[in-house]
Amino acid sequence: GAVVSQHPSWVICKSGTSVKIECRSLDFQATTMFWYRQFPKQSLMLMATSNEGSKATYEQGVEKDKFLINHASLTLSTLTVTSAHPEDSSFYICSARDSRQGTDSPLHFGNGTRLTVT
Amino acid sequence: AQSVTQPDIHITVSEGASLELRCNYSYGATPYLFWYVQSPGQGLQLLLKYFSGDTLVQGIKGFEAEFKRSQSSFNLRKPSVHWSDAAEYFCAVGAPGSQGNLIFGKGTKLSVKP
């Protein structure tokens, strides 16, 4: 079945540094990928929609200059948390849908990245 | 406002017992409905979804869910729980063709007693 690979699975960084998270669709193409954030004991919240070859669309309240998204190919989207602070510590999950299938086709989720900012 | 409510934060059931996880939603129209399962430190796996048609939908791992329009509910059920079902379960809604803009509930953590 369709697989979404997310890397790294966890990362610890110092406050003020930047962290890049990769999301790859391994056996399908995805013109659109989605980035979610999940705080402890909370639900997933959509942060942004990553569009191949164009700018990402950010949800209200998400700082686009802080969470840089690049979707340079049909199988890779990256999320860079710039100048990370402890309040950015969270679980980040990406998802993607096979572009060859319709918009009703299922989303495939990565295994997430646990970011801890010290 | 659009929202999803999972009233039970944590449920513990005995292995072999039946299970029902509740989900209520508030949405302008009949949305697409989903149940996902998340194991610790993992991403989400789709259990089942409802788009239209038969209101009782079958999913993977022996799960089923019933859409009740009058109650704005989409409860998840399993007749006999296995220890491997221990995980967090999320109900989600989305507009038809809404791409990834799903609204998730806060989740219900399921523990299974031997």
Image: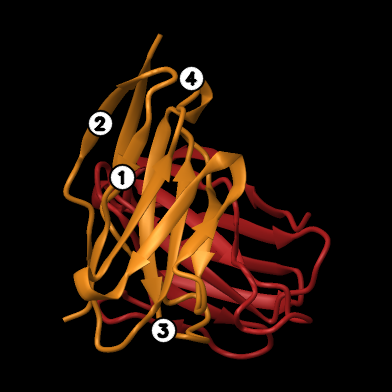
Marks 1, 4 in one chain: yes
**Residue B45 in the image: x percent, y percent?**
56, 49
Pointer 1: what residue? B21
Query: Residue B105 vs residue B92: left or right?
Result: left
Q: Please state which amino acid type lies under the numbered disc 3.
A: Ala
- In the image, which lettered chain appears orange? B
CA gap between label 1 and label 3 equals 22 Å
Pointer 4: what residue? B83
Mark closest to the chain's N terminus, 3 or 4: 4
Pointer 2: what residue? B11
Which SS class for mark 3? loop
What residue is rendered at 25% in x and 81% in y?
Answer: B27
**Residue A65 in the image: x percent, y percent?**
39, 77
Mark closest to the chain's N terminus, 2 or 3: 2
Which SS class for mark 1? strand
Residues at circles 4 and 2 in contact by the CB criterion of under 8 Å: no
Q: What colour-coding does the image apply? A: by chain
Mark closest to the chain's N terminus, 2 or 1: 2
Quick one: B43 or A82, which is closer to the camera? B43
> Please, which chain is the residue tagged with disc 4 on?
B
What residue is rendered at 60% in x and 79% in y?
Answer: A104
> Please, which chain is the residue tagged with disc 3 on?
B
Quadrant in which the C terminus of chain B appears: top left
CA gap between label 2 and label 3 equals 29 Å
A114, above or below A52, in the image: above
Q: Please state which amino acid type lies under the numbered disc 2.
A: Ile
Pointer 3: what residue? B95
Residue B67 picture quarter: bottom left
